[in-house]
Amino acid sequence: VQGFLIGLTWVSAFISALPNVVTGEIQYNADNQICETPFHLSFVIIYNIVYVYFIPLNGIMFIYVKLILYVKEINKRVTPVNTVSRAQRELKMVHRIVILVSILLILGIPYITFIFIGFFTEPPKYHFRIAFTFVNISLLFIMITLFQFTDPVKTYIIKKLKRQSNIVATTTMQMIEVR
C-alpha cells in the first residue's frame, strides 16, 4: 500500500507539472529571480488552480461533511460505545485537518490575489516574494497548530522547557608564564 501511495504521489507530481512543461509557459522572472509560470489567463493557470487547490480542498471538505453526518446518525441509534467514540475521534482528527487547511487558505490569499491580478493586468514587481512571505508565515502557523494538536509532543517540550538545569561545570585555570 505504501509503495502504491508513493507511486501515486510521483504520478500526481508529473501530472501537475506536465502542462507547464509541454506548453512552454515557464519563464524566468528577473525581478523575483525565479523561473515561474507568469500569471495571466491561460489553461495552465486554471489547470493548476483546480488541480492543486480545488480538488484536494473539496475532497477534504466532502470527507469532513460525510463524517459529521455519520457521527450524528450513529448517535441517534443504539450502537456500541466504542463505535461512537472511534467515530468521534475520527471527526476530531478531520476537524484538525480542516483547521490546518483553513490556515493555509487564509494565508494563501495574497498568492491567489496576485493570480487574479495577473488575469487582468501585470502583477506588482515583487509579487512572488510577497506571496512567498505569506506562505512561510502559514508554515509557521501550521507548525504551531500541530504543536497544539499533538499532546505527547506538547507535554514533552513543556517538560523540557520547565526543567531546571542543575548542571555543574568545573573550570580549570592554567598559569601561563610570561617572559
Image (spheres, rainbow, N blue to C red):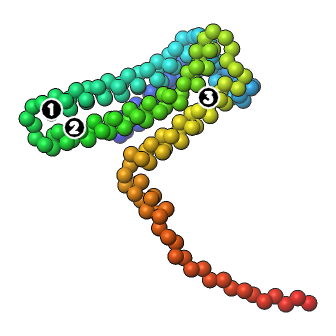
What residue do we see at 50% from left, 70% from top? Answer: 164
Instruction: For label 2, count other residues whose C-alpha is less than 10 Å away and answer few (under 14), some (14-19) or many (20+).
Output: some
Residue 50 lies, in percent from the top left, at 46, 18
Q: Which residue is mark 1?
A: 74
First along the sequence among labels 1 and 2: 1
Report the amino acid beneath label 2: Ala
Disc 3 residue crowd, few under 14, some 14–19, many 20+, Cα 10 Å: some
Sequence-wise, the earlier of marks 3 and 2 is: 2
Horizontal arrangement in the rendering, residue 82 relative to residue 46 (left or right): left
Labels 3 & 1 near each other (Cβ < 8 A)? no
Q: What's the distance in space between the residues labelled 3 and 2, CA to CA?
A: 38 Å
Question: Would you say 177 lies left or right of 161 here?
Answer: right
Query: Distance of mark 1 from mark 2, alpha carbons?
Result: 9 Å
Residue type at the position of mark 3: Ala
- Residue receiving disc 2: 87
The structure residue drawn at horizontal position 54% and vertical position 11%, both measured from the top left corner, is 43
The reply to whether callout 3 and callout 2 are in contact (CB within 8 Å) is no
Q: Residue 52 — which label?
A: none
Q: Position of residue 21 (x, y in %)?
A: 59, 20
Residue at the far left: name it: 78
Residue 61 located left or right of residue 158:
left
Assess whether mark 2 and mark 1 are in contact (beta carbons under 8 angstroms): yes
Between 69 and 128, the one nearer to me in the picture = 69
| Quadrant where the C terminus is found in the figure | bottom right
Name the residue that disc number 3 marks: 131
